[in-house]
Amino acid sequence: MALNDVKDFVIRYPGHPRYEPDRIIEDNDVEVIVQKLEMILFTNKGEVLGDNDIGCNLEYYLWQTRITTGNLKSKVEEQIDKYIPELYQMGFTFDLRLYEGTLRDILYLDFVIKGYNIEFVFE
């Protein structure tokens, strides 16, 4: 896939931190990748019709099991391998940190894509 030709529909909604009401098409390659990351990170397996495998199931792993950060990172990498392979062409790094909370744990995922820092938080 030629990364300079990346386009997708904007899937952000009112209330999303990057929502723009008049924007329909996303043509910034990093923003398209961020939308795809949001999709796999915030989706549970079985929620997408036609593809029961998409999604990291992070809510389940965080609050229903005792999983290591290494296993969580592996789950995210498997989803990236399958659903966002173009991310490897762009170059990225990502770090995952899990903090024990009082009621439930807090997960931070920090991605650096083409020099942009993107942080996802599950609490």
Image (cartoon, rainbow, N blue to C red):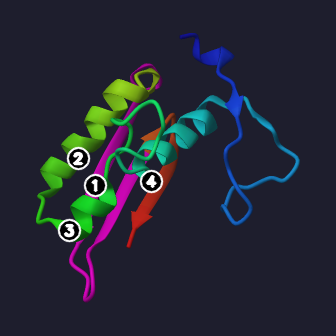
State the residue position of label 4. Answer: 42
Judged from the image, the secondary structure of the residue bearing numbered disc 3 is: helix
- Return the x and y of residue 62 as percentages of the image width and height: 25, 65
Q: Residue furthest right?
A: 22
Per the rendering, the mark at residue 73 is 2
| 2 or 3: tag closer to the N-terminus | 3
Residue 68 appears in which quarter of the rendering?
Answer: bottom left
Q: Residue at x 44, y 19 (%)?
A: 89
State the residue position of label 3. Answer: 64
Image marks 1 and 3: residues in contact by CB distance under 8 Å? no
Q: Residue at x 46, y 30 (%)?
A: 50
User: Which residues, given as a range, are shown in magenta?
Assistant: 88-111
Image quadrant containing the C terminus: bottom left
Magenta segment includes 106: yes
Amino acid residing under circle 4: Phe
Graded by Cα atoms within 10 Å as few (under 14), some (14 to 19) or many (20 or more), the crowding at tag 4 reads some
Image marks 2 and 1: residues in contact by CB distance under 8 Å? yes
| 2 or 1: tag closer to the N-terminus | 2
User: CA–CA distance between discs 3 and 4?
Assistant: 16 Å
Which marked residue is nearer to the observer: mark 2 or mark 4? Answer: 4
User: CA–CA distance between discs 4 and 1?
Assistant: 15 Å
Amino acid residing under circle 2: Lys
User: CA–CA distance between discs 1 and 3?
Assistant: 18 Å
| 2 or 4: tag closer to the N-terminus | 4
Judged from the image, the secondary structure of the residue bearing numbered disc 2 is: helix
33 vs 16, left or right, is: left
Image marks 2 and 4: residues in contact by CB distance under 8 Å? no
State the residue position of label 1. Answer: 96
- Return the x and y of residue 109 as percentages of the image width and height: 36, 55
Which marked residue is nearer to the observer: mark 2 or mark 3? Answer: 3
